[in-house]
Image (cartoon, rainbow, N blue to C red):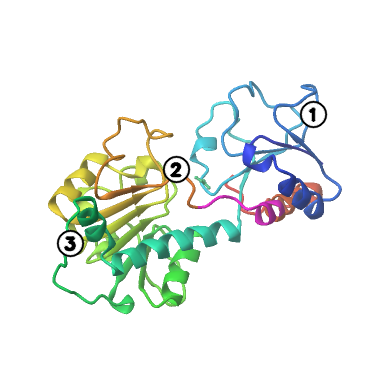
Amino acid sequence: MRVVLTDRLSHTAEFERHLKTAAPTAEFRRWPLADPSWDYDLLVSWILPDDLVSLPPSLKAIFCFGAGSDQLLADPRIPMNMPIARLEDAGQADQMLNYVLHVAFAWLQNDNAYRVAQRDTTWQRPPTKVRSRDAMRVTVLGLGPLGQRVARGLAEANFKAVAWSRSTRVVPGVETHAGWDALPAAAKNADLVVNLLPLQTETRNILNARLFSGLRSGAYLVNLGRGEHLNEDDLLQALETGTIDCAWLDVFREEPLPAQHPFWLHRKIRITPHMAGVPTAAGTSASIARVIEALKRGLPLPNALR
Ligand code: GLV
């Protein structure tokens, strides 16, 4: 099996070591190919490189080097019938959980109020309001592998974990809601909303004024999905009125976030550069190896998107 890796994150000695162990008989090469005529069976990519003009006839499948696949599904260079399998990496999911726990604890500590006061060099002691984990309602939007891990981890850490997905799912310890009609109930009185949905036509702009209006005043928001999930004007308005006290954003409509974007200097916005869940060498290599094995045996691809 011949495999091409396009993502620079995978061009490390650590990845090479893990790939060799996980799939010892496969041959891995990095993009750009030194020999452009090399025919390969599997392409491992998060976004196809600009200089990849066309896919070789030998290609059997694409492995999405990330949890979100909208960027591949929308790429006109990929024929509709090309199988695509998606990364499943417990290490990536754990990083997402850590990010969300970090924000949940920040809410518990009323962190943003103190950060703003510090910037204003103000010794400010707001009326003490003891916040407890089991009374903190955290709503996770999306129950794919990442959303499930995050919702379960929140429940295990004693937060009041709630989750919403389009189709019914059961996650131990988590209050789950399914279907569009149930979205307001899932978001109602949330102290923290975490978006881990895939980007699709129906989920575009799902983080909007209507959703924000149901949250408990002073809620925090975490967007780990895609920038297009968020209506930016509605967020700025919700931050202005105090419906949302702090937004942690890892993804943006334009990345890198342009220097003049109002989010950069906003007192109630925390920015991270699309790093909340980086694919790990061990987890990714194992996931790629499972796809290679399925291709070799002619079996359905694990985590196939199509
Ligand atoms: C990152 O954005 C991913 O899709 O995993």
Residue range of the region highlighted in magenta in the rendering: 277-285
Amino acid identity at mark 3: Trp
Q: Nearer the viewer, mark 1 or mark 2?
A: 2
How far apart marks 1 and 2 lie (CA) works out to 35 Å
- In this rendering, position of residue 17 left or right of residue 77: right
Residue 292: horizontal and vertical position, in percent? 76, 48
Q: Is mark 2 within 8 Å of ligand 1?
A: no
- Tell me if residue 282 is in the magenta stretch: yes
Residue toward you, 86 or 32: 32
Above or below, 304 relative to 8: below
Q: Earlier in the sequence, mark 1 or mark 3?
A: 1
Disc sitting over residue 273 in the figure? 2
Q: Is residue 100 visible?
A: yes
Q: Nearer the viewer, mark 2 or mark 3?
A: 3
Q: Where does label 3 land, which residue?
A: 123
Disc sitting over residue 39 in the figure? 1
Amino acid identity at mark 2: Pro
Q: Is residue 144 visible?
A: no
* Residue located at (58% from left, 24% from top): 50
Residue 121: horizontal and vertical position, in percent? 20, 53
* Residue located at (32% from left, 59% from top): 193
Q: Earlier in the sequence, mark 1 or mark 2?
A: 1
Disc sitting over residue 206 in the figure? none
- In this rendering, position of residue 243 left or right of residue 156: left
Give neighbour class at mark 1: few <14, some 14-19, many 20+ (Cα, 10 Å): some
